[in-house]
Amino acid sequence: MTKQKDNTSEVVLSVNNISKNFLLPHEKMVSIKSSIVNIFKPKDRTIEVQHALKDISFKIEKGEFFGILGRNGSGKSTLLKILAEIYQPTSGTIQKTGKLVPFIELGVGFNPELTGRENVYLNGALLGFSRAEIDEKYDDIVEFAELEEFMDQKLKNYSSGMQVRLAFSVATRSEADILLVDEVLAVGDADFQRKCYDYFKSLKKSGKTVIFVTHDMSAVREYCDRAILIKDGLIAHENTADVIANEYLKLFNENNSSSLSAVDTKRWGNGQVRVSNLDVDTSDDKISLSISIQSDKRGAENYVVGYKLYDSEGKLVMGGNNLNAKNGKKLFLEPDSKQDICFLINNVLGNGTFTLSTTARLGDGVTICDQWDNAAEIKVTKSESYYPIIAPADVSVD
Amino acid sequence: MESFLNKYRYSLILLRELVITEFKLRYQGSILGYLWSVMRPLFLFMIMYVVFVYFLQIGGDVPFWPVQLLLGIVLWNFFSEVTNNGVGSIVGRGDVIRKINFPKYVIVVASSISAFINLLINLVVIFIFMAVSGVELQWQILLAPLFILELFVFALGLALLLSALFVRIRDVNYIWEIIMQGLFYSSVVIYPITLVLAKGEFFGQLLLLNPVAQAIQDARYALISSDAITLVKLSGERWYLILIPISIVIITAIVGAYVFKKRSPTFAEDV
């Protein structure tokens, strides 16, 4: 992750006090009559000024992998378009050395009525390649896209995955000094994504300057040297990729101060015993789950209460029940009665949002009494910086 | 020359690719394909011929009037294709403009070149008609490219102006539609100018101040018949009248290019 800094580091892109305002006209024409009356009075239309970017400045050095993060609507796409010279800034300047190629979207200019081959030439031209230059690269492009048999078919007969592969293949041949990449990796199957990441690694190795906009924090951590976090049109933070990725995740956590929130729950079971109350208490080192169990008139001679924790991607992180706990014991309940159970779990979780599901079943291992998915959400914001999903507390180093 | 090529390298590459694309897509999916380039004006010619020459007996005394009529239709089609396609060309390419930065004028120029290629194909048909009708070529034919160039510059200037305005003001294409109707009937395409001159020399002069009418009439003179009445012949003593259509063309081209250049940086936001 560390970048070897030499003394001859050279700024290739310098963004100086960029601001961007959009003028949004509000047309409040109530009736046809009033709109006709007002046709020659444009002053009646109110114009709202939206400040998409406010005084943004940063510098990018040669060979850097630079991340731009921000929530939807924060202004990062506007910034990207200004960097790509698609939009003009309202004020401020950008100085750059070398050729900058933007990948706001793959396959710009692709036409469904043209064949794959013709689209390669058209897309290549938009990226600045002459026919002769594409001729040279053509076999490479087709091979990389693995579309040898399809090049003379019309693009409209391609699957979307094939189109993306072809577009990406052309894009990788662009000889840019600075690359501007906007979440293009979010598409394609696993195999294709691996290819993309391989390409990214090769870019990093060859010392290209890359500006990378994404929501994928693991990609940011893996590739970026430095990053900025845009919030409400301002640079909220500028730091190493790791720190910024954490700040980004915090944006989503700070809105919810309570650690327990009802989310999209799903619940089913025969109701012989059910969870009547659930309390989650999270501290930096312990998670306590207080579960109240209520039985109906059938009661339960032998039942099991379990919990499972899933990470934000839905992967099971940990789980357990009353039997496999340290002081595991069997549970039984008279008809129409209540029982409180408390699990005390070491909080080994890293920063992030986890969802909890609980299960109450009978000892036969088959009859589910109360399966409660997404019963609660647990947000872990540990005071120290980033941890992956699991952050064991007592790690020693010799 | 070297530096000129470097500066405009990207534009030239793009222009070439866009012209090729447009040409490929023009008759996409039609069975007769490029034959339509020739057949469309021919069928229009046949209709006009039947209505105006056969039934209404217009232009009977004008030498080679049918060929002159066809030439007029072909030139008018070229002018109308460049301007009509031009109006919506920037908006039509909005998806690309929003994704990548490139010289936008290339879009308009590419669509006008594609119309120009169409015109060249049609001119071949005209030459065939001329040969069949027994038109004798004269030295004036050397002037023809000049008048076609004049028409091209005028149409391109208008296309640049209209396409830039259309991004913000979507009324432009309707306004232009109406203007084109007026221009069509005043550009001496479907009737010989002698009909107007019968009403008075002034009206003829007035009509020929319109660059489209002047270019069409001059092209008829250069290609088909040295008897065709041109602005030069009509103005006589008042030779300075010749300067008016030429000035209109030059001013339109300059204004068009200027407005386009001024507006193009915000196309991506407005389109």
Image (cartoon, rainbow, N blue to C red):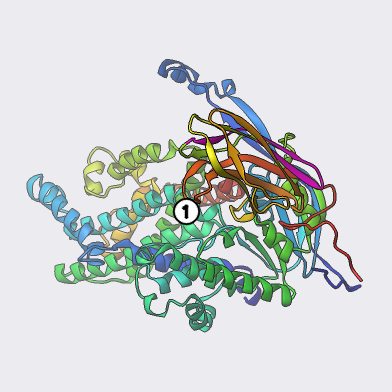
Main SS category, magenta section: strand
- Residue situated in front as seen by the camera: B62 or A151: A151
Chain letter of the residue beneath label 1 in the structure image: B
Quarter-wise, where is residue A315 in the image?
bottom right
Give the structural element (helix, strand or loop) at label 1: loop
Tell me residue B145's x, y (percent): 39, 66
Residue A344 belongs to magenta span: no
Q: Note whether B14 is above or below B177 in the view shown.
A: below
Q: Position of residue B117 (x, y in %)?
A: 36, 66
Which percent across, then down, holds residue B55?
7, 46
* Residue sitting nearer the eye, B114 or A198: A198
On the rendered image, what quadrant is the N terminus of chain A found in?
A: bottom right
Dot 1: within a 10 Å radius of its alpha carbon, few (fewer than 14), some, or many (20 or more) residues? some
Q: Is residue A89 visible?
A: yes
Q: Residue at x 73, y 61 (%)?
A: A221
| A60 or A382, nearer to the observer | A382
Residue B47 versus residue B147 in the image, above or below: above
Q: Quadrant of residue B46?
A: bottom left
Q: Quadrant of the C terminus of chain A?
A: bottom right
Residue B69: image quadrant is bottom left
Amino acid carrying label 1: it is: Arg
Q: How many marks?
A: 1
Which residue, given by chain and number where applicable, does mark 1 sit on? B93
Residue B153, how many percent across, how many down? 46, 57
Q: Is residue A247 left or right of residue B33?
A: right
Q: Is residue A384 left or right of residue B214?
A: right
Would you say residue A233 is visible in this rendering? no
Read off the magenta span.
A271-291
